[in-house]
Image (cartoon, helix red, strand yellow):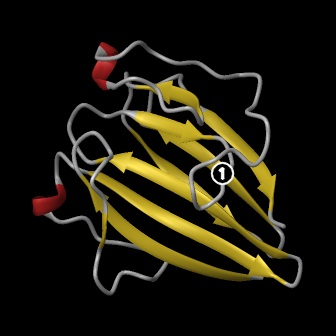
Amino acid sequence: MQYGHQWRLCDNVGAGCGDIAGERVATHAVTAAELNKTLRVLVTASNSAGQELRDLRSHLAPDHVYERFAPQNPDAQPTRTASASSSSAPAGLDGFNAPLANSVVRHSARYGVLKLTLHASSYDWAFVPVSGSTFGDAGSGSCH
């Protein structure tokens, strides 16, 4: 399994994205100039059976929002049915804009980090909240 990464910086609502020059590795150090923007990393997993794309996003602002999207292709079209445990918020509520079509989970009341573990043919993710918080989101997926 081979992985490719492309870090992108978008405006504060996640639109108007542009590639961050030279950022094609698994990690990115956030700068002060990126605050109040949306940071995206496009992770492509490839093997002899083909490739699959994951679009991970984080809004870099003190309003601490977390949103997970269903698996999608490079054109942001769903590749599988979203999980049954989805939730959403109306436009403007709790720091969110209107939900995008592939949105599965949205949360804006707790700080935390996204832990992503890549394996040869699968991946695991977990939203790890700060100590004392109860919100969590975790799961696994397979790479094609």
Q: Where residue 88 sits: x, y (%)?
A: 52, 18
In the image, residue 23 above or below residue 56: below
Up-down relation of residue 37 to residue 8 (above or below) = above
Q: Is 74 or 28 nearer to us in this picture?
A: 74
Point out the image quarter for the N terminus. Answer: bottom right
- Residue 27 is drawn in which quadrant? bottom left
Residue at the limit of the structure toward the right, as seen here: 49
Residue in the image at 73% along x and 33% along y: 82
Residue at x 65%, y 22% (from the top left corner):
86
Of the 4 image quadrants, the one containing the C terminus is bottom right
Residue type beneath disc 1:
Gln
Q: Which residue is mark 1?
A: 72
Residue occupying the point 78% across, 53% down: 141
Q: Is residue 63 left or right of residue 8?
A: left
Task: Tell me the element at label 1.
Answer: loop
- Does residue 142 appear left or right of residue 112 in this picture? right
Q: Is residue 115 left or right of residue 60?
A: right
State the image coordinates of residue 20 (x, y, percent, origin top left).
29, 75
Task: Find residue 65 and report its image quarter.
Answer: top left
Q: Nearer the viewer, residue 43 or 62?
A: 43
Task: Report crowding for label 1: few under 14, some 14 to 19, many 20 or more residues within 10 A (C-alpha).
Answer: some
